[in-house]
Amino acid sequence: MGADQHIDWASEDWTDLAASTLDWWRAAGVDVVVGDAPVNWLSRNSLPGSDEPAAIVSRAAGDGGASAAPAAAASPAVLPTTLAEFTTWRMGRDAPDAIWSGEAIAAAGPADAALMVLVDCPERGDRDTLLGGEIGRLFDNMLRAIGLSRDEVLLASVCVRRPTIGRVPRDLEQRLGEVTRQHLSLTAPAHLLLLGDAATRAVLATNVAGARERLHAFNHKNGRSTRVVASHHPRVLLDRPACKAEAWKDLILLNKGLAS
């Protein structure tokens, strides 16, 4: 952010400045613009250090004092165990991100594809399919570089709807990671390409920087294993062209696995 806060938002570089500002707030722990439930901050029950529960926590009558589950956590503890059931549930009202606005975009491609590609969420202009526009054209070029097309891969996302802040919310990151790993277990592809930090954290519990340049293994209960490669999201490559050399190395690593 810097010490000089005199920002000309009408300049040509306002988008970069806005992105920098949002990154700063995210680093400070601000994950949402507006909370789902109103809070009376003048009530002592809402103040830090209060011995009483906050106003946003409700208690069900006759439950012995157990707190009722919030609406955002309505998804079942046990996830669907067949791909057909999971696909229906993932696009339904019980999914963790079902309460978000915007169009839900399902995974696309053959369920038995040898390669699954995972991103964080739909782009702002996506309709019907993931990775549209300029970002999608770059993604298609990346696939062509290893001799593949969209029709041959299973393309999925951690969030089926785009979060308001454009990033996977931290309060749902763990649950969405569980959902993502269940999807991976049910499809069990031979190879998985993770694009971006959110997708990489969902599967490998680390960021792209810590996962790049080596093959990882995601082991399934039936004894099978998925070879995993992590790389930069195409939107990062558009913003930082210098990263394309690193992405090319990742694609070479992935291609070696696909050829073996």
Image: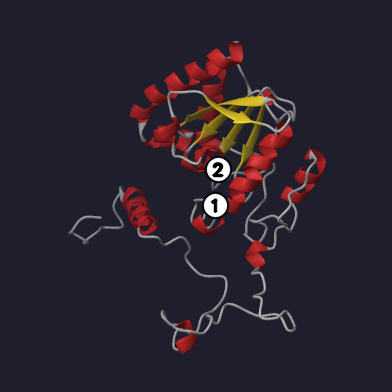
In this picture, residue 42 sits left or right of residue 123: left
The local crowd at label 2, few if under 14, some if 14 to 19, many if 20 or more residues have their Cα within 10 Å, is: many
Please name the amino acid that badge 2 sits on.
Ala
**Disc 1 vs disc 2: Cβ atoms closer than 8 Å?**
yes
Q: Position of residue 81 (x, y in %)?
A: 78, 43
Q: Residue at x 64, y 25 (%)?
A: 225
The foreground one among 100 and 129 is 100
Numbered tag placed on residue 55 in the rendering: none
Numbered tag placed on residue 173 in the rendering: 1
Q: Position of residue 240 (x, y in %)?
A: 35, 34
Q: Position of residue 149 (x, y in %)?
A: 63, 22
Q: Secondary structure at mark 2?
A: helix
Mark-to-mark CA distance, 1 and 2: 8 Å
The foreground one among 197 and 63 is 63
Q: Quadrant of the C terminus?
A: top right
Numbered tag placed on residue 202 in the rendering: 2
Q: Position of residue 132 (x, y in %)?
A: 57, 37
